[in-house]
Image (tube, rainbow, N blue to C red):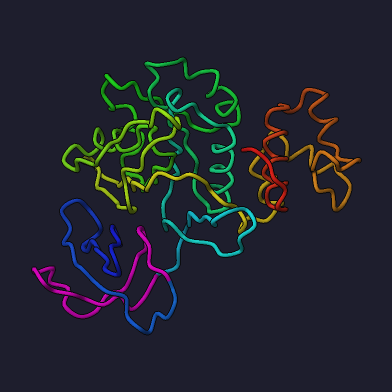
């Protein structure tokens, strides 16, 4: 399993991919062509696999991926980038304050999770600063697992949930993601950062994705803090399907309905008016769909 990528060199764990596995450094073989190798990939390696200092093997095969976390530069850029492969869970990390949580980002991450075959989890940090329930409740009602983190309390409940899984931690800079990683895997000493006073946005502290072994089994993949999550690679039907509270109503729309606010016969307005869906969620869905068409919207 690939656990780190650094300037064309790949660190792989052998012997089952546990904390005590042999680490081997490798390069990508020319015969792979333009295929990308990312953290979480299960790969075939030849050459010097001793793991000795200065040794270098070659990656010659990438096994079929069970899941992928992908993003594009923006919602209209067709070029997509695979960030992580084979993760079972996408842990969407948000602070309840400083910086304020954004439903638009969480909804985007949910779309990316469902489209990539990952199970989403919402992890709310800094709950000592504000009540997490107003933000958490709508997602919990959709069946999304919600975890919380108080900065001065043990991380045992989150650790118990993540043990045995391959989980990606994903969120904006400054939400406490690296602090969470340091609590889960204390010996890693991931760099942490504060929120910039002038912008209210976090400073980047992780520069590349890396898989870290949890003490009792499983891995967490720490990813760089993100400013945006483009979804150009996700089809509109997949975007709508990621809103299960609205998807049933969307099935009653006329064929070819865009589900946008100016779609005159869109059934979703009636669906929400009758109390089957949340108007805030409908607005979020429409922002995502409009953004994919290049329409300027705030998310």
The answer to which quarter of the image holds residue 49 is bottom left
Q: Give 291 or 55, whichever is nearer the viewer.
A: 291
Count all numbered tags in the image, as a single digit.
0
Residue 180 versus residue 1 in the image, above or below: above
Q: Residue furthest bottom?
A: 31
Position of the N terminus, as image quadrant, is bottom left
Horizontal and vertical percent position of residue 111? 59, 46
Q: Give 11 or 176, whichever is nearer the viewer.
A: 176
Residue 127 versus residue 207 in the image, above or below: above
The answer to which quarter of the image holds residue 138 is top right
Horizontal and vertical percent position of residue 22? 16, 62
Please give left or right for residue 156 compared with residue 270 in the image.
left
Span shown in magenta:
36-62
Position of the C terminus, as image quadrant, is top right
Horizontal and vertical percent position of residue 172? 44, 39
User: What residue is rendered at 55% in x and 38% in y?
Assistant: 105
Q: Give 266 or 171, whichever is nearer the viewer.
A: 171
Horizontal and vertical percent position of residue 239? 66, 47
User: What residue is rendered at 49% in x and 48% in y?
Assistant: 118
| Residue 1 visible in this rendered orientation of the protein | no
Please give left or right for residue 77 compared with residue 295 in the image.
left
Please give left or right for residue 277 compared with residue 162 in the image.
right
Q: Is residue 51 magenta?
A: yes
User: What residue is rendered at 51% in x and 18% in y?
Assistant: 133
The answer to which quarter of the image holds residue 170 is top left
Q: Is residue 161 magenta?
A: no
């Amino acid at each position: 399993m690939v656990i780190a990528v650094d300037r064309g060199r790949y660190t792989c764990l052998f012997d089952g991919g546990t904390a005590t596995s042999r680490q081997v450094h490798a390069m990508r073989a020319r015969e792979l062509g333009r295929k990308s190798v990312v953290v979480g990939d299960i790969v075939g390696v030849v050459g010097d696999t001793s793991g000795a200092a200065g040794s270098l093997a070659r990656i010659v095969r990438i096994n079929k991926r069970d899941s992928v976390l992908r993003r594009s530069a923006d919602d209209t850029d067709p070029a997509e980038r695979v960030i992580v492969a084979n993760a079972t869970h996408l842990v969407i990390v948000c602070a309840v304050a400083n910086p304020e949580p954004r439903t638009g980002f969480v909804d985007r991450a949910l779309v990316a999770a469902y489209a990539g075959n990952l199970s989403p989890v919402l992890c709310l940090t800094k709950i000592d600063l504000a009540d997490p329930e107003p933000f958490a409740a709508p997602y919990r009602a959709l069946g999304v697992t919600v975890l919380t983190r108080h900065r001065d309390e043990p991380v045992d409940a989150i650790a118990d949930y993540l043990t045995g899984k391959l989980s990606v931690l994903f969120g904006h800079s400054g939400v406490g993601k690296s602090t969470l990683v340091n609590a889960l895997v204390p010996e890693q000493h991931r760099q942490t950062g504060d929120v910039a006073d002038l912008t209210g946005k976090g400073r980047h502290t992780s520069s590349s994705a890396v898989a870290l072994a949890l003490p009792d089994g499983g891995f967490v993949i720490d990813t760089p803090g993100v400013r945006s999550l483009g979804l150009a690679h996700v089809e509109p039907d997949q975007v709508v399907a990621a809103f299960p509270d609205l998807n049933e109503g969307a099935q009653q729309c006329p064929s070819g309905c865009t589900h946008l606010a100016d779609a005159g016969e869109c059934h979703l307005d009636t669906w929400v008016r009758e109390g089957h869906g949340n108007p805030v969620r409908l607005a979020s869905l429409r922002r995502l769909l409009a953004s994919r068409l290049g329409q300027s919207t705030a998310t």
